[in-house]
Amino acid sequence: MLKKLQILICITILVAVASCFNNNQKNEAAGNLSDSALAGKKLFEATCVRCHGMDGSGLTGPSLKRAKLVHAPDEVAFIGVVEGGIAGTGMPSNWAFTDDDCKQLYAYVSYLKNQGKETPAGDTAVGRLVYARSGCANCHMMNGEGNTIGPDLSEIGASRNAAYLRQSLIDPGAALPESTDLDNGYGFSLYLPVKITTADGKQITGLRINEDTYTIQLKDASNNYYSFNKDELKSIDKQYGQSLMPSFKTTLTDKEIENLVAYLYKSGNQ
Protein backbone atom coordinates (compact mmCIF):
# COMPACT_ATOMS: atom_id res chain seq x y z
CA MET A 1 0.00 0.00 0.00
CA LEU A 2 2.82 2.36 0.96
CA LYS A 3 4.60 1.63 -2.32
CA LYS A 4 1.44 2.49 -4.31
CA LEU A 5 1.11 5.74 -2.37
CA GLN A 6 4.72 6.67 -3.14
CA ILE A 7 4.16 5.97 -6.85
CA LEU A 8 1.00 8.13 -6.80
CA ILE A 9 2.89 11.00 -5.16
CA CYS A 10 5.68 10.75 -7.76
CA ILE A 11 3.17 10.85 -10.60
CA THR A 12 1.47 13.91 -9.06
CA ILE A 13 4.81 15.69 -8.78
CA LEU A 14 5.75 14.83 -12.38
CA VAL A 15 2.41 16.16 -13.65
CA ALA A 16 2.89 19.39 -11.71
CA VAL A 17 6.44 19.82 -13.04
CA ALA A 18 5.28 19.14 -16.61
CA SER A 19 2.50 21.69 -16.20
CA CYS A 20 4.95 24.34 -14.98
CA PHE A 21 7.31 23.50 -17.86
CA ASN A 22 4.51 23.89 -20.41
CA ASN A 23 3.43 27.18 -18.87
CA ASN A 24 7.01 28.43 -19.00
CA GLN A 25 7.24 27.39 -22.65
CA LYS A 26 4.04 29.31 -23.39
CA ASN A 27 5.40 32.39 -21.61
CA GLU A 28 8.68 32.15 -23.51
CA ALA A 29 6.83 31.65 -26.81
CA ALA A 30 4.78 34.75 -26.10
CA GLY A 31 7.98 36.64 -25.49
CA ASN A 32 6.40 38.53 -22.58
CA LEU A 33 4.21 40.32 -25.08
CA SER A 34 1.76 42.96 -23.91
CA ASP A 35 -1.96 42.19 -24.21
CA SER A 36 -2.12 44.49 -27.22
CA ALA A 37 0.80 42.75 -28.94
CA LEU A 38 -0.67 39.31 -28.20
CA ALA A 39 -3.92 40.38 -29.85
CA GLY A 40 -1.88 41.73 -32.77
CA LYS A 41 -0.05 38.40 -33.02
CA LYS A 42 -3.36 36.60 -33.56
CA LEU A 43 -4.31 39.08 -36.29
CA PHE A 44 -0.89 38.71 -37.89
CA GLU A 45 -1.08 34.91 -37.95
CA ALA A 46 -4.58 35.04 -39.44
CA THR A 47 -3.93 37.54 -42.21
CA CYS A 48 -0.25 38.41 -42.75
CA VAL A 49 1.81 35.22 -42.72
CA ARG A 50 1.08 34.28 -46.34
CA CYS A 51 3.33 37.11 -47.52
CA HIS A 52 5.43 38.04 -44.49
CA GLY A 53 6.08 34.56 -43.07
CA MET A 54 4.99 33.00 -39.78
CA ASP A 55 7.84 34.66 -37.88
CA GLY A 56 7.77 37.92 -39.86
CA SER A 57 11.03 37.17 -41.68
CA GLY A 58 9.38 37.52 -45.09
CA LEU A 59 8.26 35.35 -47.99
CA THR A 60 6.91 37.04 -51.09
CA GLY A 61 6.49 40.11 -48.90
CA PRO A 62 9.31 41.88 -47.06
CA SER A 63 10.83 40.85 -43.77
CA LEU A 64 9.44 42.90 -40.89
CA LYS A 65 12.52 42.22 -38.77
CA ARG A 66 14.22 45.47 -39.64
CA ALA A 67 14.81 48.66 -37.71
CA LYS A 68 12.88 50.82 -40.16
CA LEU A 69 9.82 50.06 -42.27
CA VAL A 70 10.03 52.42 -45.25
CA HIS A 71 6.28 52.85 -45.70
CA ALA A 72 5.38 52.66 -42.02
CA PRO A 73 7.91 54.58 -39.89
CA ASP A 74 5.32 55.26 -37.15
CA GLU A 75 1.92 54.08 -35.94
CA VAL A 76 -0.10 56.58 -37.99
CA ALA A 77 1.65 55.63 -41.22
CA PHE A 78 1.33 51.93 -40.31
CA ILE A 79 -2.43 52.23 -39.92
CA GLY A 80 -2.61 53.92 -43.32
CA VAL A 81 -0.63 51.09 -44.94
CA VAL A 82 -2.70 48.31 -43.37
CA GLU A 83 -6.06 49.90 -44.13
CA GLY A 84 -5.21 51.42 -47.52
CA GLY A 85 -2.46 49.16 -48.90
CA ILE A 86 0.54 50.36 -50.91
CA ALA A 87 -0.14 51.27 -54.53
CA GLY A 88 2.06 49.53 -57.07
CA THR A 89 3.09 46.76 -54.65
CA GLY A 90 1.62 43.49 -53.46
CA MET A 91 0.40 45.07 -50.22
CA PRO A 92 -3.44 45.03 -50.41
CA SER A 93 -5.90 47.23 -48.57
CA ASN A 94 -7.62 45.69 -45.56
CA TRP A 95 -10.96 47.44 -45.23
CA ALA A 96 -12.15 45.03 -42.50
CA PHE A 97 -9.43 46.19 -40.07
CA THR A 98 -10.41 48.84 -37.53
CA ASP A 99 -7.97 51.41 -36.16
CA ASP A 100 -7.85 49.40 -32.93
CA ASP A 101 -6.97 46.25 -34.89
CA CYS A 102 -4.17 48.15 -36.61
CA LYS A 103 -2.83 49.45 -33.31
CA GLN A 104 -2.69 45.90 -31.94
CA LEU A 105 -1.00 44.72 -35.12
CA TYR A 106 1.48 47.61 -34.87
CA ALA A 107 2.31 46.56 -31.30
CA TYR A 108 3.19 43.07 -32.50
CA VAL A 109 5.13 44.26 -35.57
CA SER A 110 7.08 46.63 -33.31
CA TYR A 111 8.03 43.56 -31.27
CA LEU A 112 9.08 41.70 -34.43
CA LYS A 113 11.30 44.61 -35.51
CA ASN A 114 13.61 43.88 -32.59
CA GLN A 115 13.71 40.10 -32.99
CA GLY A 116 16.70 38.71 -34.84
CA LYS A 117 17.28 41.42 -37.42
CA GLU A 118 18.41 39.94 -40.70
CA THR A 119 21.99 40.75 -41.68
CA PRO A 120 23.28 38.78 -44.70
CA ALA A 121 26.87 37.68 -44.20
CA GLY A 122 28.22 38.51 -47.68
CA ASP A 123 30.40 41.39 -48.84
CA THR A 124 28.19 43.92 -50.64
CA ALA A 125 31.09 45.55 -52.51
CA VAL A 126 32.18 42.19 -53.92
CA GLY A 127 28.54 41.35 -54.59
CA ARG A 128 28.24 44.40 -56.79
CA LEU A 129 31.10 43.08 -58.93
CA VAL A 130 29.41 39.66 -59.12
CA TYR A 131 26.19 41.38 -60.22
CA ALA A 132 28.04 43.22 -63.01
CA ARG A 133 29.99 40.29 -64.43
CA SER A 134 27.03 37.87 -64.19
CA GLY A 135 25.06 39.95 -66.68
CA CYS A 136 22.16 40.69 -64.32
CA ALA A 137 21.63 44.08 -66.01
CA ASN A 138 20.70 42.29 -69.24
CA CYS A 139 17.31 41.56 -67.69
CA HIS A 140 17.05 43.70 -64.55
CA MET A 141 17.03 47.39 -63.80
CA MET A 142 19.14 48.60 -60.85
CA ASN A 143 19.19 52.29 -59.98
CA GLY A 144 18.25 53.36 -63.50
CA GLU A 145 20.69 51.06 -65.30
CA GLY A 146 19.81 47.83 -67.10
CA ASN A 147 16.84 46.24 -68.80
CA THR A 148 13.21 45.75 -67.80
CA ILE A 149 12.55 42.14 -68.75
CA GLY A 150 12.65 40.99 -65.13
CA PRO A 151 11.69 42.87 -61.96
CA ASP A 152 13.39 46.13 -60.97
CA LEU A 153 15.98 45.36 -58.29
CA SER A 154 16.63 48.92 -57.12
CA GLU A 155 14.72 48.38 -53.85
CA ILE A 156 14.44 44.58 -53.88
CA GLY A 157 15.90 44.27 -50.38
CA ALA A 158 12.91 46.15 -49.00
CA SER A 159 10.46 43.58 -50.35
CA ARG A 160 12.34 40.26 -50.25
CA ASN A 161 14.33 38.59 -47.48
CA ALA A 162 17.79 37.10 -47.95
CA ALA A 163 16.56 33.49 -48.08
CA TYR A 164 14.12 34.34 -50.87
CA LEU A 165 16.83 36.16 -52.84
CA ARG A 166 19.18 33.20 -52.51
CA GLN A 167 16.54 30.75 -53.69
CA SER A 168 15.75 33.01 -56.65
CA LEU A 169 19.40 32.80 -57.72
CA ILE A 170 19.69 29.03 -57.29
CA ASP A 171 16.24 27.87 -58.43
CA PRO A 172 14.36 30.88 -59.84
CA GLY A 173 11.40 28.88 -61.09
CA ALA A 174 10.59 27.55 -57.63
CA ALA A 175 9.82 30.93 -56.09
CA LEU A 176 7.80 32.99 -58.58
CA PRO A 177 6.14 35.81 -56.65
CA GLU A 178 2.35 35.97 -56.56
CA SER A 179 0.14 39.00 -56.88
CA THR A 180 -1.73 40.00 -53.73
CA ASP A 181 -3.75 42.66 -55.51
CA LEU A 182 -7.34 41.90 -54.49
CA ASP A 183 -8.74 43.86 -57.45
CA ASN A 184 -6.46 42.47 -60.17
CA GLY A 185 -5.49 38.82 -60.04
CA TYR A 186 -5.01 37.76 -56.42
CA GLY A 187 -2.71 34.72 -56.43
CA PHE A 188 -1.63 35.46 -60.01
CA SER A 189 1.90 34.06 -60.61
CA LEU A 190 4.12 36.93 -61.72
CA TYR A 191 6.88 36.46 -64.34
CA LEU A 192 5.42 33.10 -65.38
CA PRO A 193 6.97 31.74 -68.63
CA VAL A 194 4.33 30.99 -71.27
CA LYS A 195 4.76 29.36 -74.68
CA ILE A 196 2.16 30.44 -77.22
CA THR A 197 1.46 28.53 -80.43
CA THR A 198 -0.55 30.56 -82.93
CA ALA A 199 -3.06 29.12 -85.39
CA ASP A 200 -0.43 29.16 -88.16
CA GLY A 201 2.10 27.26 -85.97
CA LYS A 202 4.30 30.18 -84.89
CA GLN A 203 5.71 29.78 -81.36
CA ILE A 204 6.40 32.67 -78.98
CA THR A 205 7.83 32.24 -75.47
CA GLY A 206 7.74 35.08 -72.98
CA LEU A 207 6.65 36.25 -69.55
CA ARG A 208 2.93 36.56 -68.86
CA ILE A 209 2.06 40.19 -68.21
CA ASN A 210 -1.69 39.87 -67.86
CA GLU A 211 -4.48 37.42 -68.53
CA ASP A 212 -8.25 37.30 -68.37
CA THR A 213 -10.91 34.87 -69.56
CA TYR A 214 -10.56 35.81 -73.23
CA THR A 215 -7.07 37.29 -73.74
CA ILE A 216 -3.45 36.89 -72.66
CA GLN A 217 -0.53 39.32 -72.85
CA LEU A 218 3.19 38.57 -72.62
CA LYS A 219 6.62 39.98 -73.42
CA ASP A 220 9.60 38.06 -74.78
CA ALA A 221 13.29 38.17 -73.82
CA SER A 222 13.81 41.07 -76.26
CA ASN A 223 11.12 43.13 -74.49
CA ASN A 224 8.64 42.77 -77.35
CA TYR A 225 5.02 42.82 -76.18
CA TYR A 226 2.22 40.59 -77.53
CA SER A 227 -1.50 40.34 -76.98
CA PHE A 228 -3.64 37.42 -78.15
CA ASN A 229 -7.26 36.38 -78.17
CA LYS A 230 -7.26 32.90 -76.64
CA ASP A 231 -9.80 31.46 -79.06
CA GLU A 232 -7.44 32.29 -81.95
CA LEU A 233 -4.50 30.32 -80.51
CA LYS A 234 -3.60 26.71 -81.11
CA SER A 235 -2.18 26.25 -77.59
CA ILE A 236 -1.12 28.04 -74.41
CA ASP A 237 1.56 26.29 -72.36
CA LYS A 238 1.98 27.85 -68.91
CA GLN A 239 5.36 26.66 -67.66
CA TYR A 240 4.87 26.53 -63.90
CA GLY A 241 8.04 25.73 -61.95
CA GLN A 242 10.20 27.30 -64.64
CA SER A 243 11.70 30.74 -65.20
CA LEU A 244 13.31 32.67 -68.05
CA MET A 245 15.99 33.59 -65.53
CA PRO A 246 18.86 31.04 -65.52
CA SER A 247 19.99 29.31 -62.34
CA PHE A 248 23.36 30.46 -60.95
CA LYS A 249 23.78 27.31 -58.86
CA THR A 250 26.60 25.94 -61.01
CA THR A 251 27.94 29.15 -62.53
CA LEU A 252 28.62 30.95 -59.24
CA THR A 253 30.35 29.66 -56.13
CA ASP A 254 28.55 29.62 -52.77
CA LYS A 255 30.65 32.60 -51.69
CA GLU A 256 29.76 34.56 -54.84
CA ILE A 257 26.08 33.85 -54.27
CA GLU A 258 26.41 34.94 -50.65
CA ASN A 259 28.03 38.22 -51.75
CA LEU A 260 25.42 38.79 -54.46
CA VAL A 261 22.60 38.22 -51.98
CA ALA A 262 24.18 40.74 -49.60
CA TYR A 263 24.40 43.31 -52.41
CA LEU A 264 20.79 42.79 -53.49
CA TYR A 265 19.52 42.85 -49.92
CA LYS A 266 21.32 46.13 -49.24
CA SER A 267 19.22 47.82 -51.92
CA GLY A 268 16.20 49.04 -50.02
CA ASN A 269 17.96 48.61 -46.65
CA GLN A 270 20.49 51.43 -46.74
Image (tube, rainbow, N blue to C red):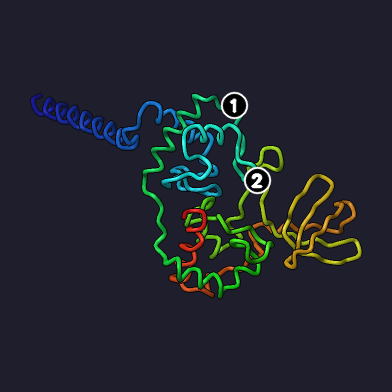
**Who's the residue at 46% across and 55% down the image?**
270
In this image, 156 relative to 238: left or right? Answer: left
Report the residue marked by disc 1. 96
- Secondary structure beneath dot 2 equals loop
Earlier in the chain: of badge 2 and badge 1, it is: 2
What residue is rendered at 25% in x and 34% in y? 21
Q: Residue furthest front?
A: 144
Distance between mark 2 and mark 1 Cα atoms = 21 Å
Residue 265, percent from left and from top = 49, 58
Q: Position of residue 49 (x, y in %)?
A: 51, 41
Residue 232 picture quarter: bottom right
Three-letter amino acid code of the residue under disc 1: Ala
Q: Nearer the viewer, mark 2 or mark 1?
A: 2
User: What residue type is disc 2 on?
Assistant: Gly
> Which residue has dot 2 on it?
88
Q: Residue 245 in the image: state x and y as whole percent.
A: 63, 65
For this view, does 186 lie left or right of residue 71? right
Image position of 68 with respect to 23: above or below: below
Q: What residue is rendered at 82% in x and 59% in y?
A: 226
